[in-house]
Image: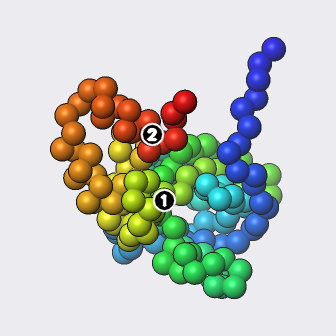
């Protein structure tokens, strides 16, 4: 008997037009249709394939601060987790279903909100501001550093 893992956040159906681009390259914008979202990410369908691990910026076409919150004014920075080719009967061409995870712009250590460009994702999936990342790099590899990373992730007994 296999267990189906539960999602960290419940999905909310929310269909809306979005535009996305490679993070740091707003010259090449692509349109897509979002179908659901949650606190941790979203699912959208695009005409082009995206590589898992790609760093993208997503903007809502009809942004409303009352509906989406002030944090969405500049869009969302996200990492592509998966991309699958899908066929829709009502459309002649294939499109791609894309699942993304939002990157967090709050430092896991000091709690400071910083610009997305100033947040750094570590190999252990911590999101640290430049100052805290610099401090973490001063600690030599070993048990102390591993313990600190586990503490910051919340993996302590």
Q: Quadrant of the C terminus?
A: top right
Measuring from the top left, give residue 42's x and y in whole percent.
Answer: 64, 57
Q: Closer to the camera, 119 or 137?
A: 137
| Position above or below: 111 against 121 | below
Circles 1, 2 touching at the beta carbon (< 8 Å): no
Does dot 2 land on a helix, a strand or a loop?
Answer: helix
- Left or right? Give the position of 128 relative to 3: left
Q: Residue at x 51, y 33 (%)?
A: 156
Q: How far is mark 1 from mark 2, CA to CA?
A: 18 Å
Q: Residue furthest top?
A: 1
Q: On the image, which quarter does residue 36 sit in? A: bottom right
Q: Closer to the camera, 130 or 12?
A: 130
Q: Residue at x 34, y 66 (%)?
A: 117
Q: Which residue is mark 1?
A: 104
| Position above or below: 28 against 22 | below
Q: Which is in the foreground here, disc 1 or disc 2?
A: 2
- Left or right? Give the position of 146 relative to 39: left
Q: Which residue is mark 2?
A: 151
Which of marks 2 and 1 precedes in the sequence? Answer: 1
Measuring from the top left, give residue 37's x and y in whole percent.
Answer: 69, 60
Label disc, if present, on residue 78 of the rendered structure: none
**Local crowd size for mark 1, using a 10 Å CA cut-off: few (<14), some (14–19), many (≥20):** many
- The answer to whether residue 30 is visible is no
Q: Quadrant of the N terminus?
A: top right
Q: Residue at x 61, y 43 (%)?
A: 84
């Amino acid at each position: 008997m296999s267990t189906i893992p539960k999602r960290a956040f419940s999905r909310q159906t929310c269909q809306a037009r979005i535009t996305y681009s490679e993070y740091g390259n707003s010259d090449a914008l692509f349109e897509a249709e979002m179908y659901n979202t949650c606190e941790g990410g979203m699912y959208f369908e695009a005409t082009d394939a995206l590589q898992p691990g790609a760093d993208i910026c997503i903007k809502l076409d009809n942004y409303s601060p009352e509906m989406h919150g002030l944090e969405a004014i500049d869009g969302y920075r996200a990492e592509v987790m998966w991309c699958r080719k899908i066929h829709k009967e009502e459309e002649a061409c294939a499109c791609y279903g894309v699942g993304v995870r939002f990157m967090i712009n709050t430092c896991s250590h000091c709690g400071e909100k910083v610009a997305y460009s100033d947040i750094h994702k570590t190999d252990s999936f911590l999101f640290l501001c430049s100052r805290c990342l610099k401090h973490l790099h001063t600690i030599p590899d070993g048990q102390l550093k591993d313990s600190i990373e586990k503490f910051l992730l919340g993996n302590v007994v």
